[in-house]
Protein backbone atom coordinates (compact mmCIF):
# COMPACT_ATOMS: atom_id res chain seq x y z
CA UNK A 1 0.00 0.00 0.00
CA UNK A 2 1.41 3.41 -0.94
CA UNK A 3 2.27 5.50 2.14
CA UNK A 4 0.52 8.84 2.60
CA UNK A 5 2.39 12.03 3.39
CA UNK A 6 1.74 12.92 7.08
CA UNK A 7 0.66 16.47 6.23
CA UNK A 8 -1.85 15.15 3.69
CA UNK A 9 -3.16 12.58 6.18
CA UNK A 10 -3.61 15.33 8.79
CA UNK A 11 -5.49 17.54 6.32
CA UNK A 12 -7.77 14.67 5.37
CA UNK A 13 -8.55 13.99 9.03
CA UNK A 14 -9.88 17.54 9.42
CA UNK A 15 -12.20 17.33 6.40
CA UNK A 16 -15.92 17.89 6.93
CA UNK A 17 -16.67 14.97 4.59
CA UNK A 18 -15.43 11.45 4.14
CA UNK A 19 -12.41 11.40 1.76
CA UNK A 20 -13.27 7.80 0.92
CA UNK A 21 -16.82 8.78 -0.06
CA UNK A 22 -15.42 11.56 -2.22
CA UNK A 23 -13.02 9.07 -3.82
CA UNK A 24 -15.92 6.76 -4.69
CA UNK A 25 -17.80 9.69 -6.23
CA UNK A 26 -14.81 10.74 -8.34
CA UNK A 27 -14.23 7.16 -9.51
CA UNK A 28 -17.88 6.58 -10.37
CA UNK A 29 -18.78 4.30 -7.47
CA UNK A 30 -17.24 2.09 -4.80
CA UNK A 31 -16.75 -0.85 -7.18
CA UNK A 32 -14.86 1.39 -9.60
CA UNK A 33 -12.60 2.52 -6.76
CA UNK A 34 -11.89 -1.09 -5.82
CA UNK A 35 -11.08 -1.96 -9.41
CA UNK A 36 -8.88 1.11 -9.88
CA UNK A 37 -6.88 0.16 -6.80
CA UNK A 38 -6.57 -3.43 -8.03
CA UNK A 39 -5.28 -2.18 -11.36
CA UNK A 40 -2.94 0.25 -9.63
CA UNK A 41 -1.43 -2.56 -7.58
CA UNK A 42 -0.81 -4.55 -10.76
CA UNK A 43 0.93 -1.59 -12.38
CA UNK A 44 2.99 -0.79 -9.28
CA UNK A 45 4.16 -4.40 -9.07
CA UNK A 46 5.44 -4.41 -12.64
CA UNK A 47 9.10 -3.29 -12.91
CA UNK A 48 8.48 -1.85 -16.37
CA UNK A 49 6.38 0.92 -14.79
CA UNK A 50 8.86 1.73 -12.01
CA UNK A 51 9.83 5.38 -11.66
CA UNK A 52 13.44 4.37 -12.30
CA UNK A 53 12.43 3.72 -15.93
CA UNK A 54 11.50 7.39 -16.33
CA UNK A 55 14.95 8.77 -17.07
CA UNK A 56 14.43 12.42 -17.93
CA UNK A 57 17.89 12.48 -19.51
CA UNK A 58 17.17 9.59 -21.88
CA UNK A 59 17.21 10.35 -25.58
CA UNK A 60 13.99 10.40 -27.61
CA UNK A 61 14.54 6.95 -29.15
CA UNK A 62 15.01 5.34 -25.73
CA UNK A 63 11.93 7.04 -24.32
CA UNK A 64 9.88 5.98 -27.35
CA UNK A 65 10.99 2.36 -27.00
CA UNK A 66 10.14 2.39 -23.30
CA UNK A 67 6.68 3.78 -24.11
CA UNK A 68 6.10 1.06 -26.72
CA UNK A 69 7.17 -1.63 -24.23
CA UNK A 70 4.77 -0.23 -21.66
CA UNK A 71 1.94 -0.08 -24.19
CA UNK A 72 2.51 -3.74 -25.01
CA UNK A 73 2.58 -4.64 -21.31
CA UNK A 74 -0.73 -2.85 -20.77
CA UNK A 75 -2.17 -4.91 -23.62
CA UNK A 76 -0.91 -8.10 -21.95
CA UNK A 77 -2.32 -7.08 -18.56
CA UNK A 78 -5.72 -6.46 -20.16
CA UNK A 79 -5.78 -10.08 -21.33
CA UNK A 80 -4.28 -11.53 -18.13
CA UNK A 81 -6.80 -9.72 -15.93
CA UNK A 82 -9.77 -10.39 -18.21
CA UNK A 83 -10.70 -6.71 -18.49
CA UNK A 84 -13.61 -5.49 -20.57
CA UNK A 85 -13.41 -2.30 -22.63
CA UNK A 86 -14.17 -0.02 -19.68
CA UNK A 87 -11.64 -1.82 -17.49
CA UNK A 88 -9.04 -1.59 -20.22
CA UNK A 89 -9.49 2.17 -20.46
CA UNK A 90 -9.22 2.41 -16.68
CA UNK A 91 -5.98 0.42 -16.74
CA UNK A 92 -4.50 2.78 -19.34
CA UNK A 93 -5.46 5.74 -17.14
CA UNK A 94 -3.89 4.13 -14.08
CA UNK A 95 -0.66 3.31 -15.94
CA UNK A 96 -0.41 7.03 -16.84
CA UNK A 97 2.44 7.17 -19.34
CA UNK A 98 2.98 8.74 -22.76
CA UNK A 99 1.39 5.94 -24.77
CA UNK A 100 2.08 6.07 -28.54
CA UNK A 101 -1.06 3.99 -29.18
CA UNK A 102 -3.51 6.22 -27.30
CA UNK A 103 -5.18 7.62 -30.41
CA UNK A 104 -5.70 4.11 -31.73
CA UNK A 105 -8.01 3.47 -28.79
CA UNK A 106 -9.54 6.93 -28.45
CA UNK A 107 -9.99 8.00 -32.08
CA UNK A 108 -9.34 5.28 -34.66
CA UNK A 109 -11.37 2.42 -33.16
CA UNK A 110 -14.33 4.61 -32.08
CA UNK A 111 -14.58 5.99 -35.63
CA UNK A 112 -14.85 2.45 -36.99
CA UNK A 113 -17.48 1.62 -34.38
CA UNK A 114 -19.49 4.76 -35.17
CA UNK A 115 -19.21 4.99 -38.95
CA UNK A 116 -18.59 1.53 -40.41
CA UNK A 117 -21.22 -0.99 -41.43
CA UNK A 118 -21.55 -4.26 -39.46
CA UNK A 119 -19.64 -6.04 -42.24
CA UNK A 120 -16.84 -3.49 -42.12
CA UNK A 121 -16.67 -3.67 -38.33
CA UNK A 122 -16.41 -7.45 -38.50
CA UNK A 123 -13.46 -7.01 -40.86
CA UNK A 124 -11.59 -4.30 -38.99
CA UNK A 125 -12.34 -4.43 -35.26
CA UNK A 126 -10.77 -7.86 -34.54
CA UNK A 127 -7.61 -6.70 -36.30
CA UNK A 128 -7.62 -3.48 -34.30
CA UNK A 129 -8.05 -5.26 -30.99
CA UNK A 130 -5.14 -7.65 -31.49
CA UNK A 131 -2.94 -4.85 -32.90
CA UNK A 132 -2.53 -6.22 -36.39
CA UNK A 133 -3.91 -2.78 -37.20
CA UNK A 134 -2.76 0.23 -35.18
CA UNK A 135 -4.45 3.36 -36.38
CA UNK A 136 -4.32 7.11 -36.00
CA UNK A 137 -6.71 9.94 -36.83
CA UNK A 138 -5.41 12.00 -39.76
CA UNK A 139 -7.60 15.08 -39.99
CA UNK A 140 -5.27 17.99 -39.34
CA UNK A 141 -3.39 19.47 -42.29
CA UNK A 142 -0.59 22.02 -42.35
CA UNK A 143 -2.99 24.73 -43.47
CA UNK A 144 -6.13 23.44 -41.80
CA UNK A 145 -6.28 22.57 -38.11
CA UNK A 146 -9.82 22.01 -36.88
CA UNK A 147 -11.31 23.63 -39.97
CA UNK A 148 -12.61 20.37 -41.44
CA UNK A 149 -14.49 22.15 -44.24
CA UNK A 150 -11.22 23.67 -45.39
CA UNK A 151 -9.17 20.49 -45.81
CA UNK A 152 -7.66 19.92 -49.25
CA UNK A 153 -6.78 16.21 -49.31
CA UNK A 154 -9.00 14.46 -51.83
CA UNK A 155 -10.28 10.90 -52.21
CA UNK A 156 -11.28 10.35 -55.82
CA UNK A 157 -13.19 7.21 -56.77
CA UNK A 158 -11.56 5.36 -59.67
CA UNK A 159 -14.32 3.20 -61.26
CA UNK A 160 -11.99 0.97 -63.27
CA UNK A 161 -10.00 0.04 -60.18
CA UNK A 162 -13.01 0.05 -57.83
CA UNK A 163 -10.85 2.04 -55.42
CA UNK A 164 -10.20 5.52 -54.09
CA UNK A 165 -7.07 7.51 -54.88
CA UNK A 166 -6.08 9.74 -51.97
CA UNK A 167 -4.06 12.77 -52.91
CA UNK A 168 -2.50 15.71 -51.06
CA UNK A 169 -2.16 18.24 -53.90
CA UNK A 170 -0.47 21.09 -52.01
CA UNK A 171 1.93 21.67 -49.13
CA UNK A 172 -0.93 23.01 -47.03
CA UNK A 173 -2.84 19.75 -47.56
CA UNK A 174 -0.07 17.70 -45.93
CA UNK A 175 -1.49 15.63 -43.06
CA UNK A 176 0.46 16.98 -40.14
CA UNK A 177 0.43 16.64 -36.33
CA UNK A 178 -1.84 13.58 -35.95
CA UNK A 179 -0.46 11.65 -32.97
CA UNK A 180 1.30 8.32 -33.73
CA UNK A 181 1.20 8.95 -37.50
CA UNK A 182 4.91 9.63 -37.90
CA UNK A 183 6.30 6.44 -36.35
CA UNK A 184 3.72 4.15 -34.75
CA UNK A 185 0.54 3.65 -36.77
CA UNK A 186 0.25 1.31 -39.74
CA UNK A 187 -3.20 2.62 -40.75
CA UNK A 188 -4.92 5.98 -40.60
CA UNK A 189 -8.47 7.23 -40.49
CA UNK A 190 -7.94 9.93 -43.12
CA UNK A 191 -10.40 12.78 -43.49
CA UNK A 192 -10.53 13.72 -47.18
CA UNK A 193 -12.85 15.34 -49.68
CA UNK A 194 -14.84 12.66 -51.50
CA UNK A 195 -14.81 13.21 -55.26
CA UNK A 196 -17.27 11.25 -57.41
CA UNK A 197 -17.50 11.84 -61.16
CA UNK A 198 -15.71 15.15 -60.71
CA UNK A 199 -18.09 16.37 -58.01
CA UNK A 200 -16.73 17.36 -54.59
CA UNK A 201 -19.02 15.87 -51.93
CA UNK A 202 -17.12 17.24 -48.94
CA UNK A 203 -15.17 15.60 -46.10
CA UNK A 204 -15.53 11.86 -45.52
CA UNK A 205 -13.61 9.25 -43.52
CA UNK A 206 -11.31 6.71 -45.21
CA UNK A 207 -9.28 3.87 -43.66
CA UNK A 208 -5.90 4.10 -45.37
CA UNK A 209 -3.06 1.54 -45.04
CA UNK A 210 0.24 3.33 -44.37
CA UNK A 211 2.87 0.67 -43.73
CA UNK A 212 3.54 -2.94 -44.74
CA UNK A 213 4.14 -5.93 -42.45
CA UNK A 214 7.75 -4.78 -41.94
CA UNK A 215 6.50 -1.33 -40.89
CA UNK A 216 7.87 0.29 -44.05
CA UNK A 217 5.83 3.01 -45.81
CA UNK A 218 3.71 1.65 -48.63
CA UNK A 219 4.28 2.88 -52.21
CA UNK A 220 2.93 6.41 -52.68
CA UNK A 221 2.97 7.19 -48.95
CA UNK A 222 5.57 9.49 -47.42
CA UNK A 223 5.83 9.28 -43.65
CA UNK A 224 8.09 10.56 -40.94
CA UNK A 225 9.30 13.66 -39.18
CA UNK A 226 10.91 16.50 -41.07
CA UNK A 227 10.44 19.06 -43.82
CA UNK A 228 8.17 18.49 -46.78
CA UNK A 229 10.25 17.65 -49.83
CA UNK A 230 7.65 16.81 -52.50
CA UNK A 231 4.40 18.79 -52.29
CA UNK A 232 2.67 16.59 -54.87
CA UNK A 233 3.05 13.11 -53.36
CA UNK A 234 -0.19 11.05 -53.29
CA UNK A 235 -0.33 11.28 -49.50
CA UNK A 236 2.40 13.23 -47.74
CA UNK A 237 2.35 12.68 -44.01
CA UNK A 238 4.60 13.69 -41.16
Image (tube, grey):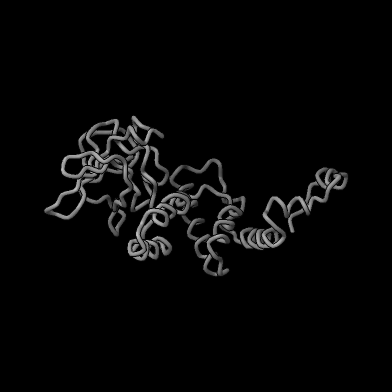
Nearest the camera: 202 or 228?
A: 202
> Which residue does the image show at 47% across and 42% down from the upper left?
59
Nearest the camera: 129 or 154?
A: 154
User: x, y percentage for residue 174?
Assistant: 30, 36
Q: How many marks?
A: 0
Q: Is 194 above or below relative to 43? A: above
Residue closest to the far right: 14
User: x, y percentage for residue 132?
Assistant: 36, 62
User: What is the quadrant of the N terminus in the image?
Assistant: bottom right
Nearest the camera: 6 or 48?
A: 6
In this rendering, position of residue 13 left or right of residue 4 = right
User: x, y percentage for residue 201?
Assistant: 26, 41
User: What is the quadrant of the C terminus in the image?
Assistant: top left
> Which residue does the image show at 34% across and 32% down from the upper left?
142
In this rendering, position of residue 60 left or right of residue 34 = left
| Residue 130 placement: quadrant | bottom left
In this rendering, position of residue 50 left or right of residue 72 = right
Q: Is 78 above or below relative to 106? A: below
Nearest the camera: 46 or 24?
A: 24
| Residue 110 placement: quadrant | bottom left
Q: Is 78 above or below relative to 168? A: below
User: x, y percentage for residue 60?
Assistant: 45, 42
Residue closest to the far left: 160
> Which residue does the image show at 55% across and 56% down from the upper left?
89
> Which residue does the image show at 27% across and 31% down from the upper left?
171
Amino acid sequence: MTSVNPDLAAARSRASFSPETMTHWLDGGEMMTLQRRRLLRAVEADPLFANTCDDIFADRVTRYRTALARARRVKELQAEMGLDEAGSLQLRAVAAFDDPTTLHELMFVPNIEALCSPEQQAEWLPRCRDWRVIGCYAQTEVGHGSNVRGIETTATFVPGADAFELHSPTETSTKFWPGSLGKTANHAMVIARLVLSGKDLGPHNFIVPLRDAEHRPLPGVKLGVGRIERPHSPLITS
